[in-house]
Image (tube, rainbow, N blue to C red):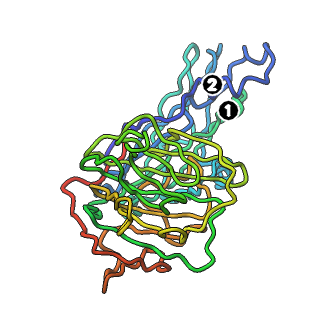
C-alpha cells in the first residue's frame, strides 16, 4: 500500500476570505471548522491497486476547549453543482472503494489542526486511463459552525493517460472536406504539438484565408515561434513556444460574445474580440491539417509532430480544455473532427478516417511515430 503525498491546487486563504466576507466582526472571531485546501489532485501510479492519504480539517481560530469534527463522503449532487459551475463533466468516484480509518477526529484545545484521519481508496487498477473522478469529502462539527464554502474538499483521482504514438508531420498533411452546408458560428481548434524547428510559417489546422491556426508568419510580422490566428481576423501571442516540447494549443471563438482566445496548456495566453457571423470551413482552399498542399503562396508545413487534433462547433471553456488535453470522448457533443493519430485510425487508399467515424480526410500518408517518452504537458 502506498501512502500518497499529494499536491493541492486551491489556496485555502482565498477560500477563507471568500467564505467570511458576509459575516459580522463577532462571527469572524468565533472559531469555525473548514478545509484549508479545497482541491487536491491524486495521480494513480502504474499498477497501483490501493493508495491512502491523510485528511485533516482545521479551525479559523483556536478554541478554548476540544472540538470534535466529523467527516463523511458528500452526496453526488455536489459534483453536479461543481460541473455546472465550472463547465466540467467529472464523475463521482465509487464510494464502495473508499474507506475512512475513522469518521471523526479531534482538534485539541489550543491547536488549529485536527488529528489525521486516513482515507484508503482501492480498485485503482481498473481505473480508466485519462479519465478523472472526484471524491468529495465534507467536514462538520456538532459544537461549532463550519466556514461557509470551505466545508467540502474535492479529491480529483486520475490515472494519467500515456500517449506514446503520435503523427509525424514533416511535409505530411490531412485535407478535410466537411459535410456540405457546414457553417461554424462558434468553434474550437485543438491539438497537441511538438515542433522540431520553426520555419517561419507552419500550419497547425484550419482554412487558409478564412480561419487558420498556425505558428509564426515572419512575412506578416509575427515571430516564427508564436501562435497566431489568421484569416478574416488576425492576432497572435507574443510569448514564443520552444522546440522539442509538447504543448496543448487551442483557439476558441464564441459567436454570442464575440470573444476569442488562444490557449496553451489550458491557460489563455492571448485574446481578441471579433464580429464574425461564422465561417464555412470548406471555403477558399479548404480545411487542412499540418500543411497547405499545393497552395500558391507556399505550403507552410509543420516541421514536427501532432496528436489529439480536434475541431468543435462550440467554444470550449478554459476548464474543458484543461480537463481534456490528452483525451476526449469521440461521441462528445459538438465534436466535429477528431484525429488521435495514435495508430488507431484507418489509413487506406490515400484517406484517413477520424476517430468520430464521420470524416474521411485525404492524406499523403501520416507516419505514426513511437515515442521513447510519453507526451507530458507541464
Q: Quadrant of residue 109?
A: top right
Residue 301 in picture, x, y percent from top left: 32, 59
**Left or right: 285, with 257 as reference point:** left
**Left or right: 22, with 147 as reference point:** right
Relative to the observer, which residue lies in front, 194 or 114?
194
The residue positioned 53% from the left and 75% from the top of the image is: 178
Q: Could you tell me how far apart the alpha carbons at marks 1 and 2 are, in whole angstroms?
A: 7 Å
Say if residue 165 shows up in the picture. no
Say if residue 212 shows up in the picture. yes
Relative to the observer, which residue lies in front, 198 or 39?
198
Quadrant position of the C terminus in the picture: top left
Residue 262 in picture, x, y percent from top left: 51, 45
Residue 226 in picture, x, y percent from top left: 40, 41
Residue 59 in picture, x, y percent from top left: 61, 22
Q: Is residue 64 above or below residue 99?
A: above
**Left or right: 181, with 202 as reference point:** right
Of all residues shown, which one is farthest toward the front?
296
The residue positioned 47% from the left and 39% from the top of the image is: 237
Mark 2 lies on residue? 67
Relative to the observer, which residue lies in front, 95 or 279?
279
The disc placed on residue 165 is none
- Earlier in the chain: of badge 1 and badge 2, it is 2
The residue positioned 27% from the left and 55% from the top of the image is: 303
Mark 1 lies on residue? 141
The residue positioned 36% from the left and 50% from the top of the image is: 201
Amino acid at each position: 500500500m502506498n501512502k500518497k503525498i499529494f499536491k493541492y491546487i486551491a489556496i485555502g486563504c482565498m477560500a477563507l476570505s471568500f467564505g467570511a466576507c458576509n459575516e459580522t466582526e463577532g462571527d469572524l472571531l468565533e472559531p469555525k471548522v473548514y478545509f484549508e485546501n479545497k482541491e487536491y489532485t491524486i495521480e494513480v501510479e502504474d499498477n497501483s491497486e490501493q493508495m491512502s492519504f491523510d485528511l485533516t480539517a482545521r479551525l479559523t481560530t483556536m478554541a478554548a476547549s476540544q472540538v470534535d469534527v466529523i467527516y463523511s463522503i458528500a452526496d453526488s449532487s455536489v459534483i453536479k453543482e461543481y460541473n455546472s459551475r465550472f463547465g466540467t463533466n467529472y464523475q463521482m468516484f465509487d464510494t464502495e472503494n473508499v474507506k475512512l480509518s475513522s469518521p471523526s477526529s479531534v482538534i485539541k484545545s489550543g491547536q488549529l489542526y485536527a488529528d489525521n484521519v486516513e482515507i484508503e481508496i482501492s480498485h485503482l487498477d481498473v481505473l480508466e486511463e485519462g479519465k478523472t473522478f472526484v471524491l468529495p469529502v465534507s467536514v462538520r462539527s456538532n459544537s461549532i459552525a463550519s466556514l461557509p464554502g470551505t466545508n467540502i474538499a474535492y479529491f480529483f483521482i486520475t490515472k494519467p493517460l500515456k500517449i506514446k504514438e503520435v503523427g509525424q508531420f514533416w511535409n505530411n498533411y490531412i485535407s478535410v472536406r466537411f459535410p456540405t452546408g457546414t457553417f461554424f458560428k462558434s468553434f474550437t481548434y485543438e491539438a497537441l504539438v511538438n515542433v522540431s524547428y520553426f520555419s517561419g510559417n507552419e500550419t497547425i489546422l484550419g482554412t487558409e484565408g478564412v480561419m487558420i491556426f498556425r505558428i509564426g508568419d515572419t512575412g506578416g510580422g509575427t515571430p516564427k515561434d508564436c501562435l497566431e490566428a489568421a484569416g478574416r481576423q488576425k492576432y497572435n501571442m507574443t510569448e514564443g513556444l520552444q522546440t522539442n516540447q509538447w504543448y496543448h494549443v487551442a483557439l476558441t471563438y464564441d459567436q454570442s460574445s464575440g470573444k476569442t482566445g488562444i490557449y496553451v496548456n489550458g491557460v489563455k495566453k492571448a485574446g481578441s474580440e471579433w464580429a464574425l457571423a461564422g465561417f464555412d470551413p470548406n471555403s477558399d482552399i479548404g480545411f487542412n491539417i499540418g500543411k497547405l498542399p499545393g497552395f500558391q503562396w507556399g505550403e507552410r508545413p509543420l516541421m514536427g509532430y501532432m496528436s489529439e487534433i480536434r475541431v468543435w462547433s462550440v467554444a470550449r471553456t478554459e476548464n474543458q480544455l484543461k480537463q481534456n488535453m490528452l483525451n476526449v470522448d469521440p461521441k462528445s457533443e459538438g465534436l466535429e473532427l477528431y484525429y488521435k493519430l495514435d495508430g488507431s485510425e484507418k489509413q487506406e487508399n490515400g484517406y484517413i478516417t477520424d476517430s468520430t467515424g464521420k470524416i474521411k480526410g485525404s492524406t499523403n500518408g501520416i507516419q505514426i511515430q513511437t515515442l521513447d517518452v510519453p507526451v507530458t504537458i507541464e
